[in-house]
Amino acid sequence: MSSVKRLGGFENYAFMHFHFDEGVIRELQIHMPGLGNEVINELRGAFMLDVGIDPIRFTVKIESVIDIIAKTLERYRLSDKMVVVLFDDIDKYTVMYGHGVLEAVVNAVSDVIRRRNASMKAIFMASDQVAVNVINRVGPKGGLSPYLIWNLPRKAFEDVVGEVSEKLGVRGVNVDLLWQLIGGNVRELAVLIGRYNWDVKPWLQGEIVKMIEYTFDDYRVARGLGKPSDVLRKLINDGNSAVREYGLGEFNGQPDIVRNDYGLLEKNIIINVGPPRVTHLSELPSEPWVGRDYAYQIPAYYWALRAMIKRKSINVAPEEILRIISTSAPIQ
């Protein structure tokens, strides 16, 4: 929001930002250019919410937030103001109670805005694929418009890596390889740096391979299969049938072939980038891990799965994944 403020031209907009994490509101920011402190202080006091851990109470509290904003706009005759309320990472809260809570919140907020005919927009920011599906499902009756914001484009990502490595005094960072592994995801870059000190091999093993193994194991239990390797075998058999049917050559884990099965969508390994009515706010990269309708959350999942498909085993070493990358997408 500070960037929006610097841009200018938003004097008739008020921005309110709620950040959710581990069941509480960790952060509240109010930016209301041109409004007096009286209004800001009134809103700030009203939003010191104790959302608690009760999902029903949570829904009612969020609904009351929107109602308070609408009443304030009416009382101070601020019909010329557009209020934008951002609920950031709300899926990290609601996932604890099931995504039905998110659906209830979205419906409640939409109802208040319509009922009061308020000059207000509510933005629900979610990275969890199941949460995104909920928002898409609510859309037609809630008046929602879905937008997709992708990771940083390559040049911007390279700039970030350069700045961070310079500040940390790290030399010899292979930016091309990081792009093939992380694909512009700054959050995952922070994980690589913070937990693994830039070392991609333990990161691949601990974050990528383990997540695929965990996902296959969950899918195995849900479908009554014998072991995680049975899930990989099913994926390979289905993939080979699909590429033969569509004349796509060799199956190597193409996202539009893998699509939303094998538990990969639920665990955010695969994401849907082409749901109905979605507007892309950022351009998707032209890379093998991005398809027309589906993409891998980060490219390392694609390369790891591709190595598993080639070996026909989920037991792949980081060196094998890096070798697949070097032979398929040569690193400068």
Image (cartoon, helix red, strand yellow):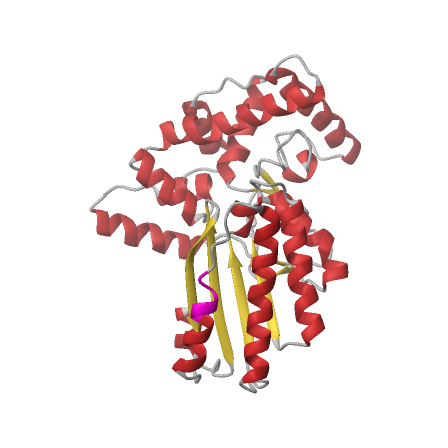
Q: Can see residue 332?
A: no
Asked whether residue 282 is drawn in magenta, I would say no
Q: Is residue 46 above or below residue 264?
A: below
Residue 21 percent coordinates (x, y): 45, 48
Say which residue appears at 60% left-offset and 18% top-offset: 228
Of residues 198 and 12, the one drawn nearer to the viewer in this rendering: 12
Residue 144's quadrant in the figure?
A: bottom right
Q: Can see residue 297?
A: yes
- The residues colored magenta run 44-48
Magenta: predominant secondary structure element? helix
Say which residue appears at 45% left-offset and 37% top-offset: 330
Q: Is residue 202 left or right of residue 305?
A: left
Quadrant the N terminus occupies: bottom left
Residue 59's quadrant in the figure?
A: bottom right
Q: Is residue 248 above or below residue 83?
A: above
Q: Is residue 147 left or right of residue 34?
A: right
Q: Residue furthest left?
A: 169
Say which residue appears at 53% left-offset and 85% top-offset: 76
Q: Is residue 211 left or right of residue 28?
A: right
Q: Is residue 255 left or right of residue 204?
A: right
Residue 34 percent coordinates (x, y): 43, 85
Residue 222 percent coordinates (x, y): 68, 23
Of residues 222 and 252, the one drawn nearer to the viewer in this rendering: 222
